[in-house]
Image (cartoon, grey):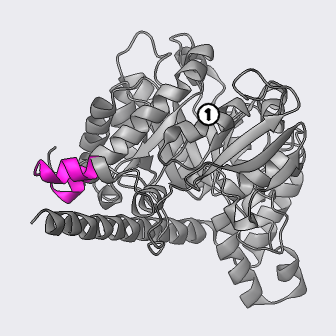
């Protein structure tokens, strides 16, 4: 493969490399709870089963099962989609990707990935060793080998979600893979990386993730105009979100396609990280009014993002695109795990439920929502309250544009560090393999 740093990669948060283990990370990791473990999730049970080798495997059980042990009763995730029109996705991916099958049966309708996820999967599992050994032996450089590992996982996961993609006529069933974080400030490089990843993955239901940096907003327009479906990530503010919507609409209009039905997109609006930063600002202010607003900024801004979504995807401009088969760019709630243990563990899921949206949940959030989440349309139940919170924060001196800019810069930087750390881990593994072959 060509110089991949000029091509593609996922986005992530900086983490230290975990110690090497022989088994891959579970799709929902209950090993920390001890095993075997059974957690009631009406009408399902999630439990741990160990095979003879000691490897743990997620088992999703219901009171009614088919011959393969696949749950045949609905779950909270099914209700979320069927009753409220929100698609639950899973924010994790590792080998074997068949570990996703119980979650798909339980109602998961898509997958998002990032370099942190792949760093954990590749560095903590032996499941990648054989392919990596073959790639290194064939003379592949470390970064090229990394991308081949990633592409295989994405392709295999896409295969599992194809039935959902077909059943929904391309509205759901996507697997996302991100361009290299090193390209976050490179407009043309991002376009070329997206085109490359789209070509090499070669699956109808792949989303190419592009960050919503100022430099990459024009990239989004170009990539959409080529008929490539995009997951726009790292959105932290309303003005940038509006720019992302406009880039999507501009891309559709400039595509020259007579049928726009196969070009789709999601806009990943980050949630919990907003509270993490704003809460620190409020604590620094220290007044009772400021302290009372802790834990409220993220949901309030997300609520207003949904209001903006409804406004932008209506009216003459949008209706003209609908006549050509265009589909709305759905809002995707990202960063849905709770960072502050004092907050409810479904804080960034329960209040953001509404039609034509996606909620991608990592282990913590998915476990919590399946266990005790409440399925009800909440996203636009109290817009006036959200507007009041948004304004109150401004009056206290919180500059929403600065919050967005800081979170974006921190996100991009942490993504770059994680990507570099992953390549270092792979280089060490590659050097070890070469030493063994001497």
How many numbered callouts? 1
Numbered range of the magenta stretch: 131-145
What secondary structure do most residues of the magenta stretch adopt?
helix
Relative to 371, say whether 17 is above or below.
Answer: below
Pick the front one: 335 or 255: 335
Whether residue 309 is situated above or below residue 291 in the rendered picture: above
- Residue 72 screen position, x and y as percent: 80, 24
* Residue extending furthest toward the front: 52
Q: Position of residue 76 (x, y in %)?
A: 83, 37
Mark 1 highlights which residue?
Answer: 101
Against 154, is 73 above or below?
above
Front position in the image: 315 or 386: 386
Label 1 secondary element: helix
Q: Quadrant of the C terminus?
A: bottom left
Picture quadrant of residue 337 = bottom right
The reply, left or right, for residue 134 in relation to residue 276 is left
Q: Is residue 183 above or below residue 258?
A: below
Image point (73%, 29%), residue name: 69
**Neighbourhood count class around disc 1 (C-alpha, 10 Å): few under 14, some 14–19, many 20 upward:** some
Residue 21 in the image: x percent, y percent?
Answer: 47, 65
Say if residue 246 shows up in the picture: no
Q: Position of residue 141 (x, y in %)?
A: 15, 56
In the displayed structure image, the side of residue 97 where residue 273 appears, left or right: right
Horizontal side of residue 55 vs 42, given as left or right: left
Answer with left or right where residue 416 lies relative to residue 95: left
Q: Quick one: quadrant of the N terminus? A: top left
User: Residue visible at 67% across and 38% down?
Assistant: 103
């Amino acid at each position: 493969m060509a110089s991949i740093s000029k091509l593609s990669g996922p986005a992530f948060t900086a983490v230290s490399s975990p110690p090497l283990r022989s088994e891959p990370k579970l799709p929902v990791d209950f090993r920390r709870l001890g095993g075997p473990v059974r957690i009631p999730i009406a009408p399902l049970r999630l439990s741990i089963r160990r095979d003879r080798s000691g490897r743990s495997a997620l088992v999703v059980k219901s009171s009614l099962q088919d011959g393969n042990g696949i749950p045949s009763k609905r779950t909270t995730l099914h209700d979320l989609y069927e009753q409220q029109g929100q698609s639950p996705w899973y924010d994790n991916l590792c080998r074997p990707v068949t570990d996703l099958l119980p979650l798909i049966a339980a109602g998961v309708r898509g997958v998002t990935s990032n370099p942190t996820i792949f760093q954990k999967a590749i560095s903590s599992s032996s499941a990648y060793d054989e392919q990596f050994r073959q790639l290194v032996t064939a003379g592949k450089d470390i970064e090229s080998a990394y991308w081949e590992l990633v592409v295989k996982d994405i392709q295999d996961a896409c295969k599992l979600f194809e039935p959902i993609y077909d059943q929904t006529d391309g509205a759901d069933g996507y697997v996302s893979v991100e361009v290299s974080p090193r390209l976050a400030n490179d407009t043309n490089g991002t376009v070329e990386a997206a085109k490359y990843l789209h070509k090499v993955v070669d699956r109808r239901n792949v989303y190419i993730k592009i960050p919503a940096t100022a430099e990459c907003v024009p990239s989004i327009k170009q990539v959409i105009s080529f008929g490539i479906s995009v997951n726009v990530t790292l959105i932290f503010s309303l003005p940038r979100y509006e720019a992302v919507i406009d880039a999507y609409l501009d891309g559709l209009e400039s595509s020259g396609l007579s049928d726009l039905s196969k070009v789709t997109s999601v806009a990943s609006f980050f949630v919990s990280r907003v509270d993490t930063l704003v809460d620190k600002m409020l604590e620094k202010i220290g007044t009772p009014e400021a302290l009372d607003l802790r834990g409220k900024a993220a949901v309030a801004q997300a609520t207003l993002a949904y209001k903006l979504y409804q406004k932008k995807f209506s009216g003459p401009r949008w209706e003209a695109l609908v006549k050509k088969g265009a589909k709305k760019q759905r809002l995707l709630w990202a960063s849905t795990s709770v960072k502050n243990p004092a907050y409810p563990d479904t804080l960034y899921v329960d209040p953001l439920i509404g039609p034509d949206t996606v909620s991608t949940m990592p282990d913590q959030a998915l476990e919590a929502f399946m266990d005790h989440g409440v399925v009800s349309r909440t996203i636009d139940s109290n817009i006036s309250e959200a507007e009041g919170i948004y304004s109150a924060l401004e009056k206290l001196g919180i500059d929403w544009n600065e919050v967005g800019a800081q979170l974006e810069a921190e996100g991009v930087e942490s993504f770059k560090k994680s990507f570099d750390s992953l390549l270092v881990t792979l280089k060490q593994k590659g050097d070890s393999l070469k030493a063994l072959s001497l």
